Amino acid sequence: MYSILNIAICDDEKIEVELLNTYVKNWAKRNRIKLEIEFFYSGESFEFQWQADKSYDILLLDIEMPGINGVELAKRIRKEDDQLDIIFITAIPDYIGEGYDVSAINYLIKPIREEKLYECLDRSIEDIGRDKKTILIDADGDIIRINQEDIVYIESISHEIEINTIKDKYITRKNIGVIEKELDKGAFVRCHRSYIVGLKHIKKITKKNVEMDSGHLVPVSRRQYKKTNKAFIDYFRGGLDE
């Protein structure tokens, strides 16, 4: 599911951050989970770091903070990232209703009980296990998480690869063979030495091209035609059998 769990704690009270840090480490030790924990004392500081690195798995987020409060920060995050699990922390139960719009996984009411935090973290790692498969790429210094099922095709151009998704296009310096190993084998096929296509997004295959749902034509090499055609048939046959 993950090799290291990345958790961020965002709270303007230093004592609260230290308490949460202790509880989280105790929980990780109990469950034999490797952790990376980072602390932030304002919504602005977390947002600045998150914009450059979206690899966080869980965010423990205080609602009442000067500047950007937790609810506003969560709304900004959800515009770009629906994978990060957010656990709200608040001293005022009246804020609980705010979480529905940002898909907060749970709430912790101050003073925080250690066992209650454990329950929230247990639920969060269950959700992470069910999450859509993703890849992380470095695009111009920004670490971006991409849902694999959104990838239409990948093209190798010189020493870079271009990842074309349903909505966006990303360029990163990576070998196509390396990224091929990171992808779900049952959902992608290398149809050409310079191209990988998402089987979900294929409309039609000919002996020369793969036509994607978007209308884009991706070349198929003669050597890879049979493999590509079989992968396409197996993918949709498997979907029908489920």
Image: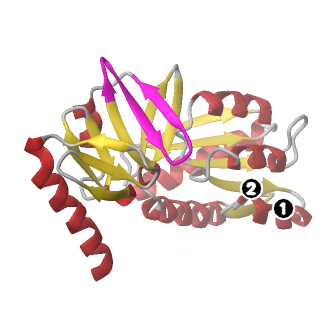
Rendered position, 37 above or below 23: above
Is residue 138 in the magenta section? no
Residue 209 visible, this angle: yes
Q: Label 1 amino acid?
A: Glu
Residue 32 relative to residue 70: left or right: left
For the point 77% across and 41% down, the residue is 11
Camera-side residue: 202 or 147?
202
Circle 2 crowding by C-alpha within 10 Å: few under 14, some 14–19, many from 20: many
For the point 55% across and 61% down, the residue is 124
Q: Label 2 amino acid?
A: Phe
Residue 184 in percent (x, y) is at 29, 53
Which quadrant is home to the N terminus?
A: bottom left
Secondary structure of the residue carrying tag 2 is strand
**Residue tagged by mark 2?**
88
Camera-side residue: 217 or 227?
217
Q: Main secondary structure of the magenta part?
A: strand
For the point 60% across and 34% down, the residue is 38
Mark 2 to mark 1: distance in Å? 10 Å
Q: Do the residues under discs 2 and 1 have CB atoms within 8 angstroms? A: yes
Residue 152 in percent (x, y) is at 41, 47
* Occupied quadrant, residue 44: top right
Camera-side residue: 136 or 45?
136
Identify the magenta region: 156-172
Is residue 171 in the magenta section? yes
Residue 175 in percent (x, y) is at 27, 26
Residue 136 in percent (x, y) is at 44, 37
Circle 1 crowding by C-alpha within 10 Å: few under 14, some 14–19, many from 20: some
Secondary structure of the residue carrying tag 1 is helix
Coloring scheme used: secondary structure
**Residue tagged by mark 1?**
98
